[in-house]
Amino acid sequence: MNGHGSFSFELKGVKELTRLLDQLPTVAMKKTVLRNALKKAGNPIAEAAKANVPVVTGRLRDSITVSPSLKPSQRKGRQDRSVVTVYVGSSSPVAHLVEFGTVERTLDEPRLVKLGGRWARITTTGFVSPNPFLRRAWHAMKMPALGIFADEMKNELYKSAGRLAKRAAAGKLTAAQVRGLSK
């Protein structure tokens, strides 16, 4: 670890992968290859998080996914469309409370809630210890995920090249693909 939330690694063959990626004719094709490889690399992290999360109803566990987008309430403005990003996490509104925990606090106004058919007056929130299920999954699976990413990049590049060759043979290349190939 070289700082909070960061790590160092060496990925063999990254120059070759970059060279192959640069040979694809359109930005859309390049982004698709990257997005697909990142999603597959994120799966082991999501599975480890599902294994780590405390299960009460199963909704939190079932909400853990790998996705190229965030739900609207998680976005902080428009994402940069030139960057390929994939997220591993939960869409549950309680995920952050479980991951980071809570502190007990007194409510300004007491709340009435119905618990088991009876009304209760709530004056304080409870304390919940942190249970960093996602952080533990990241630390356990980040290096295997990098290996999967490299392997999936190769697979996706070859699949994309095959689709491109098939389209070229059928004379069905788009104008952007023709321009990209003639560079």
Image (cartoon, rainbow, N blue to C red):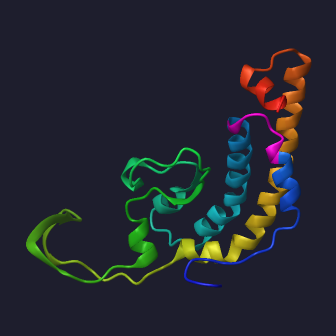
Residue at the top extreme? 171
- Residue 179: x %, y % from top left: 77, 26
Residue at the left extreme? 109
Q: Nearer the viewer, residue 178 or 102?
A: 178
- Residue 96: x %, y % from top left: 41, 69
The quadrant of the picture occupied by the N terminus is bottom right
- Quadrant in the picture for residue 135: bottom right
Q: Give the magenta part as a residue range.
A: 21-27
Q: Nearer the viewer, residue 31 or 108?
A: 31
The answer to whether 4 appears left or right of 35 in the picture is left
Q: Is 154 situated above or below 181? A: below
- Quadrant in the picture for residue 112: bottom left
The answer to whether 61 appears left or right of 16 in the picture is left
Residue at the front extreme? 183
Does residue 34 belong to the magenta stretch?
Answer: no
The answer to whether any part of residue 156 appears in the image is no
Residue at figure coordinates x 77%, y 58% from the top left: 149
The quadrant of the picture occupied by the C terminus is top right
Q: Nearer the viewer, residue 158 or 133?
A: 158
Does residue 24 belong to the magenta stretch?
Answer: yes
- Residue 50: x %, y % from top left: 59, 65
Q: Is 74 situated above or below 111? A: above
